Amino acid sequence: MRPWLRTLAFLPLIVASLSLGASGKALRTAIGSTPRMAAQPVQLAPGDPARTRIGRLAYLGGVRLTSPDRGFSGFSALQVIGDAFVLVSDRGNVVRFHMGADWRPFDIRFGELPNGPGISAYKGDRDAESLTRDPVTGKFWVGFESHNVIWRFDADFRGERVAFPLEMRGWPANGGPESMARLPDGRFVVIGETARPPGEGHRDQREMLLFAGDPTRDAPRPIRLGYVPPPGYDPSDAVALPDGRLLVLVRRFGLPSLFTVRVELVDLRGAKPGAVLRGETIADFAPPFQHDNFEGLAVAREGDSTVLWMISDDNEQWWQQTLLLKFRLDL
């Protein structure tokens, strides 16, 4: 059977399983207290080790992360601080570990977000989709879908403050703050996955909110902007570069490859209220490249290089993977 025919045959089962997992009333799968995790190297293009570039990204390596723990899945957000990694799942589970040049994880810790909207019994009440961090204080901010709120946590993920932005109240329950980034100047950007700006004529746009500072503190109302992703794609994460520009991860689901993503470079410097922003595609993860459900980005500096990390959300599905990939960014 040809690959696309095999995909077509399984499509009804795949769509049904994704719909069930996305339900806010689904019970939350908690992670255990015994941290066990393995990492197996992966190629940028499976079966073709000679491919080490994709657009303006140079592949530096990657691994498939696995664990016997049923709660080890659904990672939608990522932070990288030196050799320390923080993964947050859309079940509110947190995995922290260190990993050096040998790609072997150590000092692995499993835990959960102790705070969030609603109660912790249901997935929709701990549906963490975006994560950003202040490099000076070590504080984290988490964007929760379903309830469309933002929580601030300290460096040990103890809850400190929560915000219910008025501008996010009308966002779809399953299309809320999928992307959030802290800019180098202390401002915050939040992008709705499927949320459109208010009014008519914005079907091609996603709403982008630009906060003057910490969105969980008393501050002026955010500036409303529009972001236009490539046709058929929705934003799934964003991260700020040192110069204030954004890298936006956009994702599409369809035949024959199921999930594919692109990385876009978006310049919001000097954007005025109501501005509509478009990005430049710098990498397209269509076949033959790895093309799973990537939902998390992180940027780090290594010497003179800017390094981009990506992680995929396996949706608790047997046919998906948790992939952690590393690239040098060549702009």
Image (tube, rainbow, N blue to C red):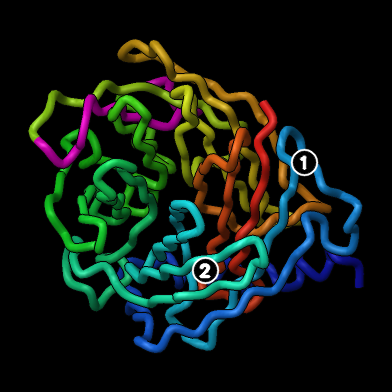
Type of the residue with mark 2: Asn
Residue 96, image x, y percentages: 41, 68
Q: Is residue 222 visible?
A: yes
Type of the residue with mark 1: Ile
Characterize the local packing of mark 2: few (<14), some (14-19) or many (20 or more) Cα atoms within 10 angstroms.
many
Residue 131, image x, y percentages: 36, 50
**Residue 207 part of the magenta segment:** yes
Give the quadrant of residue 35: bottom left
Q: Nearer the viewer, residue 307 or 256?
A: 307
- Position of residue 316 in the picture relative to residue 184 (left or right): right
- Position of residue 290 in the picture relative to residue 37 (left or right): right
Q: Nearer the viewer, residue 112 or 184?
A: 184
Residue 54 tag number: 1
Give the quadrant of residue 147: bottom left
- Position of residue 228 in the picture relative to residue 50 (left or right): left
**Residue 255 part of the magenta segment:** no
Residue 51, image x, y percentages: 87, 49
Which secondary structure, mark 2? loop
* Segment colored magenta: 200-217
Q: How many marks?
A: 2
Residue 216, image x, y percentages: 15, 41
Q: Residue at x 56, y 72 (%)?
A: 105
Which secondary structure, mark 1? strand
Q: Nearer the viewer, residue 13 or 245?
A: 245
The image quadrant where one finds the C terminus is top right
Characterize the local packing of mark 1: few (<14), some (14-19) or many (20 or more) Cα atoms within 10 angstroms.
some
Q: Earlier in the sequence, mark 1 or mark 2?
A: 1
Q: Residue furthest front?
A: 303
Q: Residue at x 88, y 58 (%)?
A: 49
Q: Which residue is mark 2?
A: 315
Q: Residue at x 63, y 74 (%)?
A: 39
